[in-house]
Amino acid sequence: MLGKERPLAGQLSRRKFVVYSLAASTLTLAAPLGCDGARADADEPASSASRRPLDVLARGADEEMLVLEVTAANKVVVRLPRVEVGQGVTTAAAMLVAEELDARLVDVDIPLAGARAKGNQYTGGSSSVSSLYGPARELAALARAKLVTAAARRWHLPARSLRTKDTRVFAPDGRSATFGSLSASAAGIQRPDVSSKPKPASRHRVIGRPTTRIDARDIVTGKAKYAGDLAVAGAKPTVVARPPTLGGKVVSVDDRAARAMPGVHAVVRIPGGVAVVAESFHHAFKAKDALRIKWAPGPLVSLSDAAIRSRLRAAVPRLGSPPRGSAQTQEEFEFAFVSHAPMEVLTAVADVRAHRAEIWFSSQTPMDARVSIASALGLPKAKVAVHVLRGGGSFGRRLNYDAAIEAALISKAARRPVKLMWSRGDDIRHGRMRPASHHRIRASRVRGKVVAFAHSTASVSEADKQSGASAQGGAGPAVAPAAGPLPSDRGLYDFGRVSERSGSVELAMPLGAWRSVDSGTVRTAEEIVVDEVAKALGKDPVAFRRTTLRSKAVKAVLAKVANAGKWGRAMPPGQAQGVAVHEEYGSCVACLVEIDATDPKSPRVTRVVMAADVGTAVNPRGLEAQLMGTAMDGISTILQAGLHIDRGAVREGSYADFHYARQRHAPPRFEAHIMPSRRQPGGAGELGVPAAAGAVANAYARATGSQPRRFPLNF
Amino acid sequence: MPSYSFVLNGKPVTVEAPADMPLLWVLRDLLNVTGPKYGCGVGVCRACTSHLDGDEIQPCVVPIADCTGREITTIEGLADGDRLHPVQQAWLDRDVAQCGFCQPGQIMAAVALLKRTPRPSDADIDRIENVCRCGTYCRIREAIKQASRSR
């Protein structure tokens, strides 16, 4: 469709967003997506309406754009260059479009775009909604204006007299026409007779309304399709035998017994191990177990947690001298490795032929994946098609595309389509991890005021990316576009001279960005120190934050949770409240936690109250879900979920020993307060992690009278 | 290869499979019934949770030989045509799902719980072991309570 586009006449715009018309038999419009999470210009003065441009000459390819089509069947289709992994981006996108078009939400389809050649197709950094907010509304508003104009011409009525509702245009006399029936004629309209400016926030009826996920019904009926559910012709179940240690290598394979087993189609070696292609996953797992493989140990075989921790401690840069005459609060913190452990293990379907390849998987970085897969296969990029599927969770895991590269190599070697699935053991033992880190933080006080705040940290960084398949498949942890200075540099608190230094210990381990990335440890540790400083000054943690936080918005979310959570209420012995705040992605959040740590080895978070200011909350119900998820991440990473390294191998191998929270660890009472705002949207998906983690740690400290310094606590 | 007959979501089916083949792979790889998900293969995460003669099972650890002549219900068989089961409806009303991957298992576990215990307490709900990595537990609890009230 878009390959045949013919630009319509128009003029260049000075506006931040431009919307292109694409010649097609149905109304099809496109707008470029910013490369850096470009924000909608919500404050655009009303007067600019009069200067609104006509359609703009289409330049560049549809590749770079967000494309909206109104089909004859009265569906509004926007192929989204983002991935849905549970964060609700498809629902938010549908809401933006439905709002400006006055379409019914059920008439808006948001399929996921396959990998493109250029443009911004990155899902991460909590940037999706902020990057879509402007373009999606601009597109839909122009589409609406053209549809109204088409109806006006059909009915010979003034366009201004027409209304839109429920995916239809209505005339004052009650006549109506579906958008679908107007699409073809709307496609030919160059200059709409009504404004194509997005609505002012005061007229929003969809944006800001708590809305159920558009895929909720598919999910609860089992119809939602993930990579492993696809029926790609001939793609046979495939698993990989992996080494006992990280980065271990195959020395020799005796695959005679495996090959002789029924239902086994192929056994092939890949960099990460030995792959078995079989008739079912049952056959594949059994044949994998029948392989006799001699492994050479990986490079870390002499290394265990204790040594990693001491190397990290030694790698923390010096804090420097504190200001003369100041008193110090100095603390050290350690965080263990953490698995992403999305419910859906890495799965990729690959059909590699001599001169082309087709891959299906869930990816936050499909453009990079396509380049890497093409390179691994020795094919030109243009011959590799990457289909992006919904993911069963990600938390940063699907920034990397380990399984897709493996699937492609296996398909090539086995000369047949394959459906590769990592086992849960593969995922936890050889998958990526949040790096372990060590933190040294010093707050310097003079006359009851913090005059300097220094944070030095060291974390494990990934060395030797070429070794082993599990180290393939991605640009490493930090592929997020730089989002400005680190949170602590922004001066969340009025703490005088703020400094941050970081060191690292390079190890050949598969690492990856984990929801909220560095903030999940850096800011969590800082929030614990803030409580310590308050204690040293004899101040209440909320009162102290109230007087030292710089931003009004952060003070407001803190006040909200303190009020809603009845901060300071009397609690029985062994129980306590804790609080923490965080600011990032143009948003801020506060979290109040109540914990019952009567048994310190088996604490239960009994209540979580969060308040978030994310600017315009497109879908408050979705935002609440994201906050709820980050609360569970805070509970898990602080109290119980982590990975041990024993002699170069990950000790844990399933959810039986990687103790991500279950229902019995979830707070019986959870509430999220969304601060009203008409600001453009900030980021929300990762925002809550540091505040939740900090509040859990602070509550635990107050309940037990202890100073939690190594996380997870029960490990 | 031996063949096994059972009732799947109300319909009789017969499959040829090795006796030790877990029901999960019979469903997914032989019958293309993909609602039950693989999450661990060892009965821990419970993403595959389904029903055998109305009781909760984890098909990843139930061999097909144990299913002969019995009734298996997966998430696909829970609704009555277009009319959702009250637990599915509660899941929709509470917008429980995020990524959705564990939710078929969560729903089947909740249905089994409500069958055993029509008015479950918080402690009863706490005993659900199904993992939700997105952390939707609070909404799961609300949805179970709503479904319990609607009975």
Image (cartoon, rainbow, N blue to C red):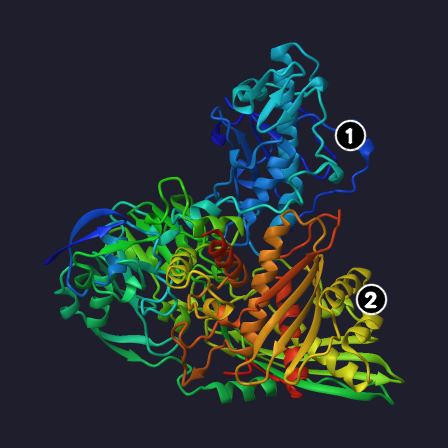
Residue that lies at the very extreme toward the right in this rendered image: A447
Query: Residue A705 falls in which quadrant of the image?
Result: bottom right
Q: Is residue A372 above or below residue A548?
A: above
Which mark is on residue B142?
Answer: none
Q: Say whether residue B105 is left or right of residue A256.
A: right
Of pointers 1 and 2, the one earlier in the residue sequence: 1
Is residue A661 visible in the rendered image? The answer is: no
- Helix, strand or loop for disc 1: helix
Q: Nearer the viewer, residue B107 or A141?
A: B107
Quadrant of residue B68 in the image?
bottom left
Q: Position of residue A81 (x, y in %)?
A: 53, 45
Query: What residue did someone put label 2 on?
Result: A550
- The kind of residue tagged 1 is Ala
| Cα distance between the residues tagged 1 and 2 | 36 Å
Closest to the observer: B119 or A308? B119
Residue at 66% across, 69% down = A691
- Point out which mark residue A49 bears: 1
Q: Depth check: A128 or A459 in front?
A: A128
| Image position, residue A203 (x, y; %) | 73, 36
- How many residues crowd mark 1 within 10 Å: few (<14), some (14–19), many (20+)? few
